Amino acid sequence: MKKIIHYPFLFLTSIAGLLFFMAFPRLFNFRPSESEHLGMQLSGFIKAIEATAVQFFKPESWGVLESWYQETVIDRYTYSLELIFFSLLFTIFIGSVIAYLFMNLPYKQRIRVKNVLNFFEGIPDLLVIFMMQLFLFMLYREFNIRLVTMYGLAGKEPIIFPMIINSLLPSLFFAQYLIKVMEEEFEKHYILLGQAKGLSKLQLLFSHLTRNIVPVVSIHFKTIIFMVLTTLVLVEHMFVLDGYIKELNKLLQIQNSSPVHIFFYVGVFMLPVILVERFVSLIGKKFGSVRGMDI
């Protein structure tokens, strides 16, 4: 019963959010006598919401497949999805490697690693991307070394470098969260029991602790997914990539663009991401049902 109510409610709130997003600019207007100040016009905002909602019921607004099902749009769509999924895999791999290496370090070195992770946590994504660009430019200009293909040129879109940049900060954030969960888990009684029975630290980490932290990590992984998505917008723009974000931006810039088209374009893009998030949640529930330790 709960799921029957949940999904229609989620659909309706998504449409309401889209209507609010499209009508929001009409909430503000420049006053003719004081052009340097913004005024608020609630009546215009409400009328814009009504006019946008009416378009959902116009038959001509539903011819969205003809504009979406084109070779260029499909290519951009698949390219952006490849970047997202490869970035998520890279994030999981790098974050896990950092966390497991951290757990095997001496106490003093752990403090230094934590300080480094805390430092990178406060750095904006845009600054990291900009510094990486400058570093690669310097290598190419001074030493004629081109490590990776940075920009999309002649119809060939790079994968490796955008994937690395797109998952750099999410992987550090994921590692930081894994470290916190692992340290809390290492204080529990079953770890102390395993140590008393002579199990090595590696056995405890990989055989028992990993299985028990999967349910907690799977809940938090939704944050990592949306971090990758937000970084993708910056990466595609700054590296001139011909991805799906470019297609969405072009659609939003069209005057009187149909809300049905926008809803469909965004929905098709988010559907695989939502399915991945649900898949990770199911894995967490599966591990949670067998949580425990048989030593």
Image: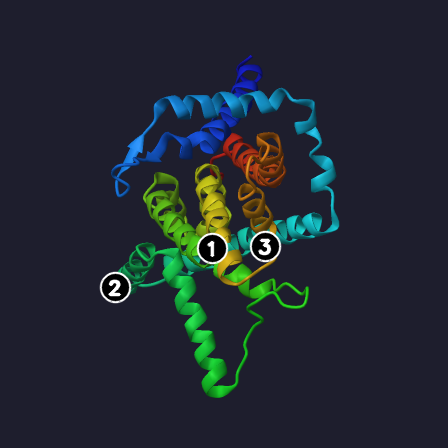
The quadrant the N terminus occupies is top right
Check disc 3 and report its element: helix, strand or loop.
helix
x 34%, y 40%: residue: 188
Q: Give the CA separation, mark 2 to mark 1.
A: 36 Å
Residue that label 1 marks: 234
- Side of 94 relative to 41 (left or right): right
CA neighbours of label 2 inside 10 A, class few (<14), some (14 to 19), many (20+)? few
| Closer to viewer: mark 2 or mark 3 | 3
Query: Which of the two discs, 3 and 1, sits closer to the camera?
Result: 1
**Residue at the spot of label 3:** 83
For the rendered model, the colour scheme is: rainbow
Three-letter code, disc 3: Leu
Where is residue 143 drawn, in percent x and y?
48, 87
Please state if 231 lies on the left or on the right of 271 as rendered: left
Q: Which residue is mark 2?
A: 108
The reply to whether the C-beta atoms of the residues labelled 2 and 1 are less than 8 Å apart is no
Q: Amino acid at mark 1?
A: Leu
Query: Mark 2: which amino acid?
Result: Lys
Q: SS class of the residue under badge 2?
A: helix
